[in-house]
Image (cartoon, grey):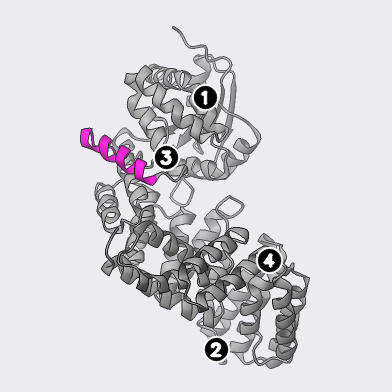
Amino acid sequence: MEINYSQNKVLIVDNRLDDLAELKAALTQLGIKTIHVASSVNMALALLREETYDICFALFDLGKTEKNGLQLIQEAGAEGTKLYTTTFILVVDQDRSKLLFGSLDTAPDTYISKPYDIAKIRVRLEKILRIKSVLQPLEKLLNQGQLSEALEQCGRYIHSYPGLVLYIHRLEGEILLRLGQETQAVKLFKSLLKRRDLPWARVGLGVALSRLGRVQEAIRVFKGVIQEAHLCVEAFVGLANAHRAVGERRVALDLLRQATLIQPTSPLLQAALGKIALHEGEHSIAAKAYREAIEYSRGGCFEQHSYYVGLVASLQVKVDGSDDADSVQAQESAVKVLEELILAFSDLPTRLIARLFWTELYRARGADPEFMSACQAAFDVYCQCELSEQAQWQELLLDRIRGSDIESEVQQVKEQLNRQVLELDWGKLNVQGMLAYRKQDFARAQALFQKANLCLPDNPGVVLNLVQVYLESQGQRETVLTRELAEMDDLLWELDFNVLSRKQQNRHKNMGERLAALFVDGTVC
């Protein structure tokens, strides 16, 4: 049956005007009437936020310093504008296409190559559109976030449409990971790989194994994907994170440097490199990586204040009390980044963090009047924050204003705040957890800290308490539950190390080393 293209709305992402006009003309010949164009990934993302498209053609290579077509799919998926019912077609040379389908959930539906051939485009389009037409009810469930219903639908479709089994299994694997059913995902991916080598199935397997704490297995799986030159962000980040988890940070650093050379416009890769480099004392590498992460995430869903903070922390180590040119330049650069941070994120906690970094810059320069003024400015912002926010940042505030004229005043505020926090759910749970910990009732303490973290996620004090009690509880166990170990490792690593107090940073480092030792030496269960 002939497909009627007249009602399809199409988006073309290409910055080469002649090629764009050629593809547009070919699609018009097919009967497509509504065609929008974008010359960059950011422009395409803006259109996807406003319009729903049936088909999106994205050129992979948009320029060496420009985000590529794969990143469009990745970012659209991350911000929720990539609909499963939209057909994403990558425009890429045929010999490179096989290297770009390694991702489980951010790969295109199919590809076409230049020079454009209307007959080939028609065949490719008709094939994928017929598949998506059959699976439209399933894809609509995924668009609506009805994952359990979609998973059941997959099972029914596999029996009804055996010719689409791989396409359906791919969706099934993605759903299982999104539902947190990693054990089932491992079984599915291993079953598929016994029959056929599928890069996306290997990536999915690596992700599932990592989440289950089976790190060494995950390393072997991710290595296999990368060694075959697949351009897959998930594989590089997954492999680097696995090496980092077992304490092999230099290996992780080298991997991420390699990955950013291959795909320099990925903010996720650059940020991952910056974080590892900063931990390893490679401040120049960290600064460059964080600059790139800021540049390529600006205005998008991946933009995070931690990128700016990481860059400031990378520059701050060069600031001292001398008039050395490097020190002066580092301070000026750090101040500029802090100003950009406040412009990009105007919320009170971000303004507080920026102010607290200013105090350190002035302290390092030995500028006492400016330091005292910066401490007062930070405290003024702190007093405007909500109670939970004040509790979250009180340790960092006390750390950064030590030796200032307002230190005693802040200590008094802390004592009052500690009483007020007991009125909040997470505050009560945190205190109860500490009491249970002192009685060495580690199981109860861990449960209480986990509840507190659910009430107020990413509070540094609560997360550090939770990981601490988990580590202490290992002395009462014969085996290491790797799934739980992986969860603790993720919680600790996801904390922004740069906004912890010195005491908290020391705890973080110590616990990170202990977790790594458990991955290496613990009895796996």
Circles 1 and 4: CB atoms closer than 8 Å: no
Report the residue at 39% width, 75% height from top. Answer: 280
Q: Which of 178/90 is in front?
A: 178
Bin the neighbour count of mark 4 within 10 Å (Cα to Cα): few under 14, some 14-19, many 20 and up.
some
Report the residue at 73% width, 92% height from top. Answer: 405
Q: Which residue is mark 2?
A: 320
Q: Which of 422/464 is in front?
A: 422
- Looking at the image, is mark 3 or mark 1 earlier in the sequence? 1
Q: Amino acid at mark 1?
A: Lys
Q: Amino acid at mark 4?
A: Ile
Can residue 130 be seen in this snapshot? Answer: yes
Q: Which residue is mark 3?
A: 176
Q: Nearer the viewer, mark 4 or mark 2?
A: 4
Q: Nearer the viewer, mark 3 or mark 1?
A: 3
**Residue 356: image location, x then y, percent:** 65, 78
Q: Which of 418/344 is in front?
A: 418
Q: Quadrant of residue 459?
A: bottom right
Q: Which residue is mark 1?
A: 24
Q: Nearer the viewer, mark 1 or mark 4?
A: 4
Circles 2 and 3: CB atoms closer than 8 Å: no
| Distance Cα–Cα, label 1 vs label 2 | 58 Å
